Amino acid sequence: MSFNNTNERSKLAKWLLPLLLVGSAVHAEITLKGAMATDHPGATISRHIYGQFSEHLGASIYDGIWVGPESDIPNVRGIRKDVVAALKDIKVPVVRWPGGCFADEYHWRDGIGPRDQRPVRKNNWWGGGLESNAFGTHEFFDFAQMIGSDAYISVNVASSTPTEMREWIEYLTSDDADTIANQRRANGREEPFKVDFIGIGNESWGCGGTMTPEYYANELRRFSAFFHKNGFGFHDNNDNNALRVASGANNLDTQWTKVVMTNAAMAMDAISLHFYTLFEGDWPKRNEAKATGFSLDQWHEILFQANRMEEVLQAHIEVMDQQDPEKRIGLYVDEWGTWYDVEEGTEPGFLYQQNTLRDALVAATTLNIFHRHTDRVRMANIAQTVNVLQAMLLTDGEKMAKTPTYYVFKMYVPFQDANFIPVDIKVPMIKHKGKRYPAVSVTAATGKDGRIHVGIANLSLDQNYTLELDLGNVLTVTEGTILTHAALDAHNIPGEQEQIMPHVFDAASVVGEHLKASVPSKSVVVLTLQ
Ligand code: AHR
């Protein structure tokens, strides 16, 4: 039997799910007691940890964001209206572009000027298809502005030069009458673009040049010398206000962070980290890493791996604290998310995967972990925005679906730039085949609106928990939202009725100074208190 498209897989998943749920009868509710230090708020949770990553990969840019001005799909200047509207609703704070591995082969001049005269290149990293360059610098900044997001560009280090980087920055930011700025004007943009972050290389240990950390640190110093960052010593007579992001480590490779920090700290404002939620921390193996229709072992493995973000962050932060105790340098997790087998019948190089309730739990757990490290982790970019890996949105022609991960990002909007509130709570561990991970994850913060927001992820398959949190204050629950479903792999398909979306949650109240919330198994809950 073969299942060639998402619909067939979805039907199969529905047939399999009763099997998945066998033996998962819900047990009597357990109470977990703790306290929230509402009077002692911590650091600001940077809104940038809610960032996105959009690469020239599969249907991420083309079809997912860009359809072109001539398309029948409703668009503004070639950019999909439905995608823009959906992304505005989750208040995307920053988008990273154009890659990824693609960035270290990208030449920015290919993507400016009249679109019909732009060169067509091979996308060698992702499926070998043709890259029309229709979506280039002007289109990206148009998109970022449409969704109200800051811009984070990655420059080509591995197959380019500091001159090419310098000229792109000048094209983007110069307000003078220099030839490059005039070229931008001739291409329709009078005022400079606002560039907030610039990544100097991507995965320089891998697709970005297979460099050693020592070699990359030298490259970073060399490129940084021509970055001409405003306010940077004698280079301060220019218009470039972007922060420099060094290409960082993968997973637990703290040696990379240590060497690059030791040899080139002066050449960066942040260093990145990539951590994907993969089976056994390894590359997906066909039929073992299913996005839907997965086994219970696969359910547990992914939630276990997602929780490893905590130890991975701690390891890199420890190294950074030794080199930079003042915490001048940010840690940007500029690629994270689940990585499964691609959907049956799709191009393996396009990394198109479905997204389920399990991904929503991964997202909430990960965001809660980021909150706990907010003094160092100041940006994160989930991979990727549309149609690739743990996407927010999936498109199919003119149809679009919002994924469960999208809904977590929507529920968590109040945490953007909120003040972290420490939560002291002891939670039970889920044990499966020799591995352990916390059953419940809780986060809290005082929002910019002055209200208190609490995010809870219950990762248990079958155990409801009642949380009793001492608030030290008399408050009222004013809002509650829940994302859950009976099916472990509940997901949404473009053009079909939505299966999983948030609902009002009313099983929480404050008695005296105690918040009491009955949180069902496999759910994400967000509460607002006032
Ligand atoms: O997000 C897909 C790819 O994963 C990126 O291009 C690369 O940086 C990482 O290996």
Image (cartoon, rainbow, N blue to C red):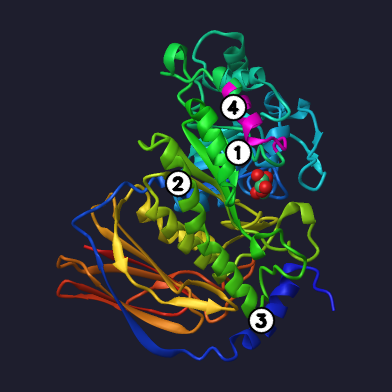
Amino acid, disc 3:
Lys
Which of pointers 3 and 4 lies earlier in the amino acid sequence?
A: 3
Q: Position of residue 148 (x, y in %)?
A: 46, 41
**Foreground mark, 4 or 1?**
4
Q: Which residue is mark 1?
A: 97
**Foreground mark, 3 or 2?**
2
**CB atoms of marks 3 and 4 within 8 Å:** no
**Quadrant in which residue 301 is drawn:** bottom right
Which of pointers 1 and 2 lies earlier in the amino acid sequence?
A: 1
Amino acid, disc 4:
Leu
Q: CA distance from mark 1 to mark 2?
A: 25 Å
Amino acid, disc 2:
Ile
Residue 288 seen anywhere in this rendered image of the structure: yes
Q: Quadrant of the N terminus?
A: bottom right
**CB atoms of marks 3 and 1 within 8 Å:** no
Q: CA distance from mark 4 to mark 2?
A: 20 Å
Q: Which residue is mark 4?
A: 220
* Label 2 beta carbon within 8 A of ligand 1: no
Q: CA distance from mark 3 to mark 4?
A: 50 Å
Q: Which residue is mark 3?
A: 14
* Label 4 beta carbon within 8 A of ligand 1: no
* Viewer-side residue, 276 vs 519: 276
